[in-house]
């Protein structure tokens, strides 16, 4: 019983953010993550003084210890440890602890230590701390509604990019000193041009190539309207749906967007659940 | 009679994707297309070992044989072969078989073999296999609704680009070592700038030229709103129309977007037809 | 009286596009404009053979003669010649005839002949020939509705660009060999970056400069949403207004967008007028 | 009493723009600001003749005197001077007067004089002079409505950019002569690419790096739809709310967007207040 109470208490602190202790924990976690990422970024700079190396290693040891302790506690206090361990966040939490241990096993593996930077993704875990947690959820729901349309658009763009790249290779590929020396390079160029990025590391030199480039640019400039339109409409529909939400208790409608409780009877409107 | 049954059976396998055999055929086709395009891309790389050449040629022979066989079967089992042969997909299917045969007739024609990459367009044929086939159709319908407005915008942009290009040629054309050496080049620059691609292979050097560039950029940055707005509104209208669809049988409304059958009486809401 | 009839007949041919003669005239005009612009573009190319020069000059003489004749006829048959002469289109029509005459007066004035390319703008005059004339009008009306909001956004962007340019000059201006050598150049850079054009002819080299660049890019990437949103909403409102249009005769509503005649009683819904 | 009347009179002239004197003051202020900014920009040019230096200094003295006088008057005639002094505009007004005084105290401080360019921000103060003052307010309100969603998107983009930058450092960082020499540089590159700016000062050279670049571009090209959608919907909602506004006097609805007075009873619909 006492065990259960401890588990429950820890759960509230670690997984939730409604209590002062829970908030403090989440804020500590954010700072640890940011510090950890900051260390990786600083380490990559060449001109750092040598004496900084030792404090950097010490801090990395401390951070790994903290993340390991946190991971074990999460496993311990989770109602269903196996479910947590295999959830998306569980795997990310585990990965955040591993780099240093792996670096012991495989010394010299430079990449393992850079991987620590991806601890940044854990920031999303403590997102619920912020006031705009619900806004993020609404955005995600709207994007999920339109994901199929966006996927169709994405496939269309990929096929377009490969076709244009091949066409450009036929036009410019035979010129001496061309940078369209093979189809993958040409596809890379098509991607750079269609998305209006335009590095300029590969540019057409023939008149026909420049004309085709112009067409590709205009196409890219125009079809960007498609995903934008899709997302706009999706957000609009979601907004309409939100306004038309029915309170499960008193069955009245017209609640504000983002409202979580019925403004007439106070019962919860929101049936979203977090993983436990 | 037996002939008709075979034709019908083949038709279901090749043209439709609702049966297991039809799905298997479509998946096979996708892999053949991707393999064929992959071969063309790999062949364009310079550093490939010589011994790879023979398997590449053999595979190309096999793929061409498969596409030829498929084209003939499609012609055979189609209810109206001539209609199929002259439909957009029919012509694309034919073109997919030709490159190797033409390469026999005109040896050394490098381009003919690269053309094989455009077999990729055939992917659209098997698009109906995917769950988001209807989404694609809805996107297309919405774009068709707004095609006239987009065409007006496109013509406006083309006239703008030519005018700006000419203006820039007047400003920068007389400078020594300028890259605005003729009007087509200047138009190409205007296109690169207005569409916010910005390669940087041609850039203004005079103060007036830079000022004009800045204006062109700001114009390009602002008018991209026009196609986006057009498509958003078009998708919105299509959504409203979908919600307001009337079941042809029971005349009730309020069906979900993408629904194909009336949720009250079960009769088909969808009158789209594929080419046969 | 006979004079009036001739005037009226000419007016229908030249200013309108509903009769076969009017259509023929407009199509001829489009081809003359395109030919004229094509000539200017071709002349700007350096490698042209010398023998082409004479036919080019002859064609330019013929085109100028045609445009002059057209301008005089328009003046003649217009109900209010002075109103036409000072309208936007009247001035453009006049300018289209002038370059060659001016080139006689001021020989060697290279620019005067390039100005001929702006005859392209006259294409808009014969726009009404195309089916999407109404679409263009609707787009323009929607843009005019939102022109104030877009102007506010534009002014905001201009102030932002100048401020960022100045800030960047303070950061990077003191470095040796910098391209941020003065504030106008820095403003040009800010414009290139904020609009996501990104030529790369001027790029930051200091860490602080790169950080500021990153911020500017993210700002530019995000605020492009503002004009897009404005135009989307404006088009949406225009669409709603169109659907809610009331027939001036039978007072019924629900006409399709772009409809010009009431579908119930056939009277005109459209009160747009062209300049005469 | 007389003092109060003077204060009131000055207040109307300086803070409001409805009287001819108020308008004249605002227009003078705009010209002074533009002149001041123009001076800073001109001074930054290298090739200026020496004799221009004296008039530039004299004008700067005059402008500083004017801004100082204006600031003191504003303080004097404001009903609550301390509230004005600590408002955003009050601080900006103060900052506009300081650079020259500070330059006396710290001679040689080049930056202090460049800071004068930020007087440009004061332009926003006299924005209410223009007819589109209300439009700007509506835009701002709509943006404030969606600020949380945009903040979520912004944080997501920042995390994405850092992650992609780190990933690219792992891929390209080990190559000789690479420009991905440390993680901050790689993050800068990720920012340049994701926002579709594409300077081209840092570009990938390995095949894997180019592939990842292509993916980043396509992501950046697609997710730009999110802020656009957010702002579109926010403007749409604001428009709907405006149309549904209720007159506080006669309680009727259906007023035009931007209307400030009820069209039925003439009482004010607008409860916006300026800082005093």
Image: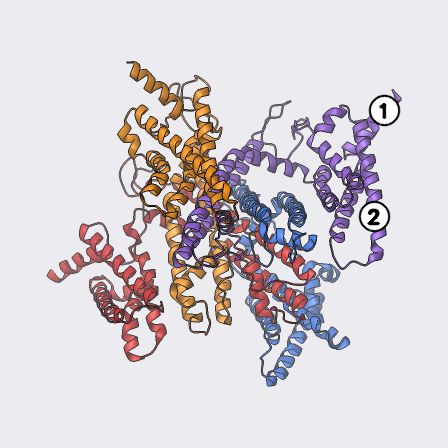
Chain colours: A orange, B red, C blue, D purple
Q: Which residue is identified by label 1?
A: D5
Give the vertical position of B235 relative to B63 (above or below).
Answer: above
Q: Position of residue B81 (x, y in %)?
A: 24, 65
Give the vertical position of D232 relative to D81 (above or below).
Answer: below
Residue drawn where x is 48% and y is 66% of the image: A212
What crowding class fits label 2: few (fewer than 14 Cα within 10 Å), some (14-19), or many (20 or more)? few
Q: Is residue C132 visible?
A: no
Marks 1 & 2 on one chain: yes
Give whichever of B132, A253 is nearer the camera: B132
Residue drawn where x is 82% and y is 50% of the image: D56
What crowding class fits label 1: few (fewer than 14 Cα within 10 Å), some (14-19), or many (20 or more)? few
The secondary element bearing badge 1 is classed as helix
- The single residue placed furthest to the right in the displayed view is D2
Q: Which residue is identified by label 2?
A: D57
Q: Position of residue D65 (x, y in %)?
A: 84, 39
- The single residue placed furthest to the bottom in the displayed view is C51
Relative to residue C234, is residue A64 drawn left or right?
left
Task: Tell me the distance, in whole angstroms, between the alpha carbons under discs 1 and 2.
Answer: 37 Å
Q: Position of residue C93 (x, y in %)?
A: 68, 65
Relative to residue D252, is residue A235 drawn left or right?
left
């Amino acid at each position: 019983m006492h065990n259960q109470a401890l588990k429950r208490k820890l759960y509230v602190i670690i997984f939730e953010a409604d209590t002062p202790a829970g908030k403090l924990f989440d804020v500590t976690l954010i700072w640890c993550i940011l510090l950890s990422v900051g260390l990786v970024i600083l380490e990559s700079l060449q001109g750092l003084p040598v004496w900084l190396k030792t404090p950097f290693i010490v801090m990395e040891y401390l951070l790994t210890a903290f993340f390991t302790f946190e991971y074990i506690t999460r496993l311990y206090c989770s109602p269903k440890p196996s479910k947590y361990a295999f959830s998306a966040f569980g795997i990310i939490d585990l990965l955040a602890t591993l780099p240093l241990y792996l670096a012991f096993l495989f010394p010299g593996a430079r990449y393992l230590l850079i991987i620590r930077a991806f601890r940044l993704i854990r920031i999303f875990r403590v997102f619920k701390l912020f006031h705009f947690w619900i806004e993020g959820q609404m955005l995600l729901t709207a994007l999920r509604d339109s994901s199929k349309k966006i996927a169709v658009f994405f496939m269309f763009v990929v096929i377009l990019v490969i076709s244009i790249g091949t066409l450009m290779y036929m036009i410019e590929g035979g010129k001496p000193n061309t940078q369209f020396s093979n189809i993958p390079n040409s596809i890379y160029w098509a991607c750079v041009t269609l998305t209006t990025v335009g590095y300029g590391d590969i540019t057409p030199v023939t008149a026909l190539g420049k004309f085709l480039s112009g067409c590709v640019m205009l196409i890219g400039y125009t079809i960007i309207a498609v995903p934008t339109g899709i997302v706009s409409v999706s957000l609009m529909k979601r907004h309409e749906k939100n306004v038309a939400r029915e309170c499960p208790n008193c069955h009245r409608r017209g609640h504000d967007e983002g409202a979580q409780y019925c403004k007439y009877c106070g019962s919860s409107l929101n049936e979203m659940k977090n993983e436990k």
